[in-house]
Image (cartoon, helix red, strand yellow):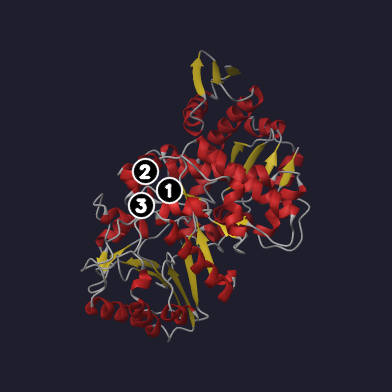
Amino acid sequence: MKVSASFKLTAADRPAGLRAGEWIEGFYPDVIVTFGGSRVQLECERRSVATLELIWHSYLANEKLLERGAADRSSVLQTLLQ
Amino acid sequence: MTFLPLRARPIDDGHALFVNDAGRFFSGSSAFLGRLEQESLTVEDMTWLASEGHAIVEGDQLGANALAHGIAERLTVAGALDYLILVPTLRCNLSCSYCQVSRAGLGQSGFDWTDATLAAVGRQLDELTTDRIKIEFQGGEPTLRPDLIKAVIERCERFSERQFVVCTNLQELDDELLELFDRADLFISTSLDGDRVTHGANRTGNDADTARFMTNLETVIRRYGPGKVSALPTVNPASPPPIDALIESYASLGLESIFLRPINFQGFARKRHQDSREQDATWRGYYERFVRRVIERNWEDRSRVLEETYFSICLRRIFQPGRERHVDLRNPNPMGIDYIVVDHDGIVYPTDEARMLSRTRVIDLSIGDVFTGWAGHKRDRLNLHATNQFDPACRRCVYQPYCGRDLVDDLARYARIDMPRLETEFCRRHLHIFDFIFELIYSSDPAVNYSLSRWLRIPGVPHAFGARIP
């Protein structure tokens, strides 16, 4: 039985959300991500709605953290190279 | 602005796992995940994250240095060469269906080291700069040439710390070999695919040879104790043996570590076991049931501790950075620096799998030879790509700090090194095993916690293996 969960995507979150959708399909080949208007839907056959929610919020958070932390991560790597 | 060097991934108990770039981790509720994603963390959240090294406030140089130190601790820095896999002969007295190196027949000529090769290996050993040495004798069947094994060992007497491993099928065992095996610095590694029927079907092909192997295995275990002898099963995922039968075949011999390996997509296996290129959910399910059964047995009988070797290696990668030198799971994974493989013809390879790929003419991954050296352009080109640090998928993966990079495995399976990481067997295998490990780390089952503690070699059982944030 197909299970799906739908999430609102604000304009501000849209770039990170689009990237998150791509990576979710990579990390979870059984999950299909569809974007439509200001919403995104995750669909799969063998996971619960709660898990789909966790997946979406985890990978959206990852994209935001990756973007916000890019400069700091570079700085830490520079420290290691010195 | 505060730097949160974190990545997230759901785990099976309805929480998300958070791991920072240095590999420190905690479990968070969906409410915490929401606050993190919405950038609305509470003061309590931030205080806790900062105290645990997960948040670095702008200007906090100590925190930044601590994070850098934690990352550095997990990165491999290859030292001087001190680990050699030597193949004194490619000849073998068995012909296993999944032989990884396409062995040569027992009577064939031209597949043993020549005097010149032995002399060149000796010169290379003399030039090593370390005080310690580990040498693994592989094959073919290396015990067909005990004279070469002895000659190498004699050449290593100058090293203060020595370890030799003879990887043998134990089909033959005579007084000369036993005298060699009597050395305290020599260990025996063999293959045991399960009970007699399974082992016979996979390897020896007849009852008499199987019986001889079992007798020889029992002889060396009786003579030296199980601490000196290790055995590995190769499992056909299409027809894996019953779990209890496989465990019992090891436990009954006093062997406590079982490295559950599916057929490697190398050598003869590329033709005869083509489905071994990728493992599917069936294998992963078998693997999980196997580990869970080992946990049950450890709990039922606490006089001994059984383990699945690779699970323990991955577990220690999480909790004990820098201690595990398993070459298939390190990052970066420098090749041809601190360990090499010397084939029967003196050709040098960065790994044993690289030797196999070259033997089967998939790709020539030789990096030199013992006569002229191997520190050249080919090695350097491989090493340019031997890290998971900058891969876009790995940068988004919570397990990146614990995971590795195996270029040769990618070449073996896909004939390229730039496959999208998430589509590789290496990545899928490790995503599965780390997901499984973290499910167990956050388990409340005392039997699970008992086994995890033993596999980590720590005294007692901790109150918890990982923090939780509500």
**Residue B383: x, y in percent?**
35, 57
The answer as to whether the residues below labels 1 and 2 share one chain is: yes
Query: Numbered disc 3: what chain?
Result: B
Rounded to the nearest angstrom, the CA distance separating label 3 from label 1 is: 16 Å
Rounded to the nearest angstrom, the CA distance separating label 3 from label 2 is: 19 Å
Q: Earlier in the sequence, mark 3 or mark 2?
A: 2
- Compared to residue B194, the image places residue B123 above or below, namely below
Q: Residues within 10 Å of mark 3 (few under 14, many from 20)?
A: many
Give the farthest residue toward the top. A37
Residue at image mark 1 = B263
- Compared to residue B274, the image places residue B255 above or below, namely below
Amino acid on which the number 3 mark rests in the picture: Val
Foreground of the two, B316 or B91 = B91
Secondary structure beneath dot 2 equals loop
**Residue B219: x, y in percent?**
53, 72
Give the farthest residue toward the front. B208
Amino acid on which the number 1 mark rests in the picture: Ile
Q: Nearer the viewer, mark 3 or mark 1?
A: 1
At horizontal 46% and vertical 28% (from top left) the residue drawn is A22
Rounded to the nearest angstrom, the CA distance separating label 1 from label 2 is: 8 Å
Amino acid on which the number 2 mark rests in the picture: His
Q: Residues within 10 Å of mark 2 (few under 14, many from 20)?
A: some
Q: Nearer the viewer, mark 3 or mark 2?
A: 2
Residue at image mark 3 = B408
- Compared to residue B65, the image places residue B112 above or below, namely below
Answer with left or right where residue B119 lies relative to residue A42: left
Answer with left or right where residue B74 lies relative to residue B437: left
**Residue B424: x, y in percent?**
41, 40
- Compared to residue B445, the image places residue B214 above or below, namely below
The mark found on residue B273 in the picture is 2
